[in-house]
Amino acid sequence: MMASDDLDEPYAQYSEQFEPRAPKRKAPRSHKRTPPRAEVVSELAETSGMEAGFATTYVPARYEEIWLRDSLRPFYDEHLIVDVLSQVKGGKEASVYCCTADPSTGTARLAAKVYRPRMFRNLRNDAVYREGRAILTAEGRAAKKTDHRLMRAVGKKTAFGAQVSHTSWVMHEYTTMERLYAAGAAVPKPYAAAENGILMEYIGDEQRAAPAPNEISLPRRVAYPLFQEILRTIELLLQHALAHGDLSAYNILFWEGRAVLIDFPQVVALSANRQAKAILQRDITRVCEYFARQGVRANASTITNDMWARYGAAIDDDLAALFEPPAQIE
C-alpha cells in the first residue's frame, strides 16, 4: 500500500480513482527515500495486534500482520466480514484467507484474496498479460488512453504509475469474475474489491477448503464430467474475448461435483494481445495434462484450434497489422 504523500505531486488529482481510501492531500513535503526491503520487513515485524478493534481468530506472522489488516479492513468496515479464521493458501503473489461473513451477506464464510506488497511479489513477464488490456480504475472503469500524463506515469513506472498498474491488475481479476459469474460460469461469486484484495465466495465447508486438482486423484468416471465443465468455462471466457492466462491444476477447485476456476489477474484480452492463441494453447495443454493422468484422453492442440477457429481467428489479421512479431511465451 502506498501512502498518499508518496504520490508524485502532478498526479494528486488521480488519487481517488486509484487509491479510493486516500485521505485529502496535505501540503507537499520533501520526498522520502524508499526504504530497502530488509528495513520494510523489520518495520512490519515491529507491528503487533490487529489495530482499531479488528481482532481475528487467525494469528498472522508478525511481518504479515500490517498488510493483512490494511488489506482486509475495508471489508470489515463495510460489514462484509467479522473475523479471519485461517489462511487457506499462500502464494508468491497473493494469499487466500477464510473469513467469517457478516450475517448481512447471507452466507457463513467468505474467501479473501490478499495481494502481497508489490516489492515482495515476483511475477515474471507480466507485460505479456497486460498487452492490449485497458488500465482500470478502482471502480473498474477504463482510463482514457488519451490521458497522456497517466499513461506516461505507467510507462515510466513512477511510484504513482506502479500504484495505477497494481489497481488495474486487481480490478481486471475482479471485473472478470463479475462477468463470468453473471454469465453462469463455474467461478466463485465475487462480493467486493478493495485496494489490495478481493472478497469472494468461499468454496469448501467448516472442515476444509475445496482441494485443487494437484492435491488429489480422481477416477475417470468423476474426472471426465469435470474436464467437460472446465472446457465450457474456457469457452465462456472466449465468448467474452478473454483467456484465463494461468490455468493449471493449481487454479481449479473441485467441490461437490463442480470444477471451479479461480485466479484471474493474468486474464488476456484476445482482441489486442499477440500471444492470445499461444496463451490459450498453454492453458488447455496444462488442463489436458492433468486429466490425462486421471484417464481422460484429449488432444490439446485439436481443442485449441477448434476453439480458436470459432472465437479467435477473426482477430488474427487485425493483430498482424498492429504489431511486430511477438516475443516467445516461456
Image (cartoon, helix red, strand yellow):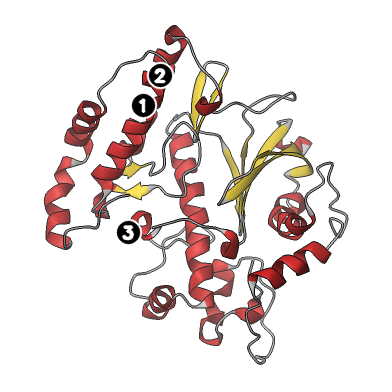
Q: Is residue 151 above or below residue 277?
A: below
Q: Amino acid at mark 1?
A: Glu
Please state the horizontal and vertical placement of residue 165, each as a whole percent of the image. Answer: 47, 65
Alpha-carbon span between mark 3 and mark 1: 27 Å
Callout 3: helix, strand or loop? Answer: loop
Residue 131, label in figure: 3
Please state the horizontal and vertical placement of residue 193, each as a whole percent of the image. Answer: 59, 51
Q: Quadrant of the N terminus?
A: bottom right
Q: Which residue is mark 1?
A: 289
Residue 211, label in figure: none
Q: Amino acid at mark 3?
A: Glu
Q: Which mark lies nearer to you, 3 or 1?
A: 1
Q: Residue furthest front?
A: 38
Q: Is residue 278 above or below residue 206?
A: below
Q: Earlier in the sequence, mark 2 or mark 3?
A: 3
Between 253 and 298, which is closer to the camera in this rendering?
Answer: 298
Residue at image position (55%, 83%) is 8
Callout 1: helix, strand or loop? Answer: helix
Please state the horizontal and vertical placement of residue 17, each as a whole percent of the image. Answer: 54, 68
The quarter of the picture where residue 203 lies is top right
Residue at image position (37%, 32%) is 286
Residue 174 as seen in the image, left or right of residue 43: left
Is there CB contact under 8 Å for labels 1 and 2? yes
Residue at image position (52%, 75%) is 160
Q: Which residue is mark 2?
A: 293
Between 191 and 28, which is closer to the camera in this rendering?
Answer: 28
